[in-house]
Amino acid sequence: MESIIDRLMRGSSQLDVVAIVGMPGLGKTTLASKVYSDRSIKFHFHIRAWCTISQAYSKHNLLLQILCVIDSRSSDHIIR
């Protein structure tokens, strides 16, 4: 957890991805949730969005999900 938080907080000026991968049941979602809820992460990032992605996903729906969390309006207000 500390390593992921450190990587997110130091970050680079470029877009970066921190992947959490592993076998089912290892606690990936729990780890991600703890990082997302960490006080230092909440302070460092003024915008955070939690979304769920399955193996088969739509980029359009993922973007709508993120925008709805950020904007707090329903996806009906977003032009499709």
Image (cartoon, helix red, strand yellow):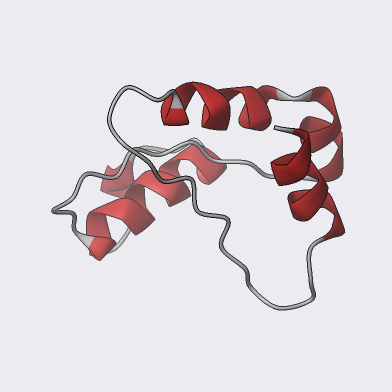
Residue 25 % position (x, y) = 32, 22
Image quadrant containing the N terminus: top right
Q: Where is 65 relative to 24, above or below?
A: below
Residue 38 % position (x, y) = 75, 25
Q: Where is 80 relative to 45, above or below?
A: below
Q: Decide if residue 56 is on the left or right side of residue 9.
A: left
Residue under the image location 55 percent in, 27 percent down: 31
Residue under the image location 25 percent in, 62 percent down: 60
Of residues 80 and 40, which is closer to you in this image?
A: 40
Residue under the image location 19 percent in, 59 percent down: 58
Q: Quadrant of residue 54?
A: top left
Q: Decide if residue 77 is on the left or right side of residue 17.
A: left
Q: Where is 10 relative to 42, above or below?
A: below
The extreme left residue here reads 56
Residue 76 % position (x, y) = 26, 45
Residue 12 in view: yes
Image quadrant containing the C terminus: bottom left
